[in-house]
Image: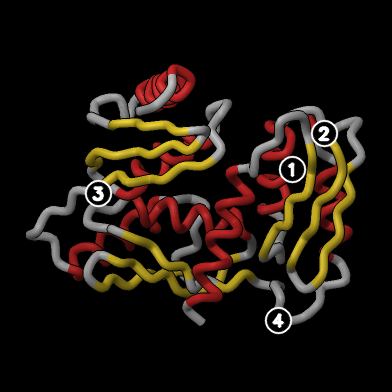
Amino acid sequence: MGTREDEELAGRVLESIKQDKGLSAYEINVRALDGAVHLSGVVDVLVEKMRAGDIASRVTGVDSVENGLTVCTDGQITDDDVAFEVAEELRLDNNVDISRVHGESSKGVVHLHGHVDSLAHERAAITAAARARGVKEIVSHLAVEGGDRADDPGLTSRVQAAIAAEKRLHPYAISARAERGVVRLEGEVQSEDQIEIAAELVSGVKGVQRIENRLTAPNRKTSAPEEAAQEIIDAREHNE
């Protein structure tokens, strides 16, 4: 049985999820134990499951999220139907170049293939595909151009320039170093929001294939953009 602190944390997480208009109609259950949060319930599409997990992870006091939400899949939807809907969602997203990205479905597991310019574009493709009905899981095989296949001597400079141009990160000293597509961020900022801003910013730089975010802030948690980038890389490496 959870403590009062656990119950209060679960209540704050549920309230945050219910504030999202796209999730407010769902019966989502939240349990918390010593900072670990578990979500359960049923949603219509994968992107809603992803969004609920992301919202929960950003609530103060949450250390980890076990996303047990189930995506309700219509039994009449075939893999051809799923692939068609994925193609439509990719086409409708302005951040996805459909001439370079395509998806294939096998029993509701969608595999994305092709090439993108950055982690941000890869994440856009994943999010777009997750909006399609019948998608249970997404595995990215997308290759980030200028990634770790060869060292890019200009990548460090591009990352540093992007950080320097972001007013929300001044006057903090952030060190950025890139090697073979992997960018390491180090330094100290004022808040977790700034850690996330830095990670999100770097994910949009062409050629960045992974982010090692070692930025520190008071009561710092692992940032959502860093986790997302790492999950994408882990999935790609597992399937190569």
The residue beneath circle 1 is 198
Label 3 crowd (10 A; few <14 / some 14-19 / many >=20): many
Q: Earlier in the sequence, mark 1 or mark 3?
A: 3
Q: CA distance from mark 4 to mark 3?
A: 36 Å
Q: Secondary structure at mark 4?
A: loop
| Front-lying residue, 46 or 87 | 46
The residue that appears at 49% across and 58% down in the rendered structure is 96
Which quadrant of the figure has residue 22? top left
The residue beneath circle 4 is 149
Q: CA distance from mark 1 to mark 2?
A: 10 Å
The residue beneath circle 3 is 71
* Residue 164 in the image: above or below residue 157: above
Image coords of residue 220 (percent x, y): 70, 35
| Front-lying residue, 227 or 172 | 227
What kind of residue is marked 4?
Arg
Disc 4 versus disc 2: nearer the observer: 2
The residue that appears at 26% across and 73% down in the rendered structure is 106
Q: CA distance from mark 2 to mark 3?
A: 37 Å
What kind of residue is marked 3?
Val
What kind of residue is marked 2?
Val
The residue beneath circle 2 is 189
Count the marks: how many? 4
Q: Earlier in the sequence, mark 4 or mark 1?
A: 4
CB under 8 Å between callouts 1 and 2? yes
CB under 8 Å between callouts 4 and 2? no
Dividing the image into 4 quarters, which one contains the N terminus? top left
The residue that appears at 34% across and 60% down in the rendered structure is 137
